[in-house]
Each structure stands twice: as structure tokens, then as C-alpha cells.
Amino acid sequence: MARPKNKEELLQQSAESYQKLLDLIDSIPKEKQQLAFPFEDRDKNIRDVVVHLHEWHNMALDWYQVGMRGDKPFMPAEGYTWRTTPELNLVIWQKYQETDLETAMELLNKTHHAEMEIIAEHSNEELFTKKYYKWTNTTSLGAIFISSTTSHYEWAMKKIRKFKKAAGIK
């Protein structure tokens, strides 16, 4: 899928990729959705992938709120740099180990829709002009939301497809 270049494409691709992700998860029998991945990975199951997406939504939403009120958000998170995202991702993984898949799906749905609402509120210029908002540094607001929606959904689907194949799920 080509990277979205305007608001309409971002909204459409985010919605389509999100639905494809949900459909992919639903294509796995309920009793097998809880299985551990039969390969070595930070994420051990579908729940881990889902909460990873949710938490990156949360971070993007937080960056947005902090930035739009005129402050400088910690990106990706306080105490972390883009180079240390593997450590941050491990902290995210640990945070949700007591969360069940059903709750994880509800959390993801809530934050996905929150991002979609924010995207819908902005113009093409606001979304796709680099440095339009000072807090986005050298990038654009749209690029931040592409990273936390369409691009991340594609990553998640790739991982879940790998699980399906490795587990012999048709």
C-alpha cells in the first residue's frame, strides 16, 4: 500500500488497514487467538501485538495533546530516545502482561478511533506540511499518525500472518 499523501488517503488507509487487522484476528478461531507464537519474538501472542499498537496510539495522542497546548512532548517517551525504542517496547510489553485479549481489543478500538477523530479535524496542510506545528520537529503531523496507524497496522498483520502460518492455522 502506498504511503498516504493527503487527509483523505490517511483516513481511508487507516480505516482499511485497521479493518483488515480486525478481520485477520477474527479469521483465527477464538481458542487459537490465545496461543503463544511458535517463534522467538518480543511479542509472544496476539494480545502483545494489540497492546503494542494501543500503547503507540496512546503515545501519539499524548504527543498531540502536549504539542497542541504549546509544550514540547517527550518523543517517543520520557527517558527514551528513538534509538532506545526496543527498551521502551519491552516496557510496554511488560505493562500489559495481565491484560486479556478482549480488553486489549477494546483498548485498541478506543485509541484507534481517537486518532481517526483527530485526523478528521485537520486540513491537508496541517497534516502534511513538515514543521507546520513546531512540536513535530522536522516531520509532519500526518507522518506521526501514519506511523501509529497504517504503518503499524501493516507491521501487526505481518506478525499475525507469520503466527497463523507457523501454527498451521488456515
Image (tube, rainbow, N blue to C red):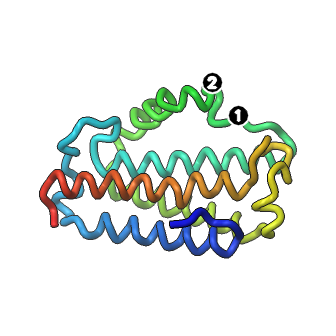
Q: CA distance from mark 1 to mark 2?
A: 8 Å
Around disc 2, counting alpha carbons within 10 Å, would you say few (fewer than 14), some (14 to 19), or many (20 or more)? few
Camera-side residue of 4 and 50: 4
Q: In which quadrant is the C terminus drawn?
A: bottom left
Which residue is located at x 63 percent, y 66 percent?
Answer: 4
User: Where is 119 relative to 96, above or below?
Assistant: below
Q: Are marks 1 and 2 in contact (CB under 8 Å)?
A: yes
Q: What amino acid is at disc 2?
A: Gly
Mark 1 or mark 2, which has the lower sequence index? 1
Element under disc 1: loop
Q: Which residue is mark 1?
A: 74
Q: Which residue is mark 2?
A: 79
Residue 114: x and y, percent? 62, 62
Camera-side residue of 137 and 29: 137
Element under disc 2: loop
Q: Which quadrant would residue 102 be assigned to in this image?
A: bottom left
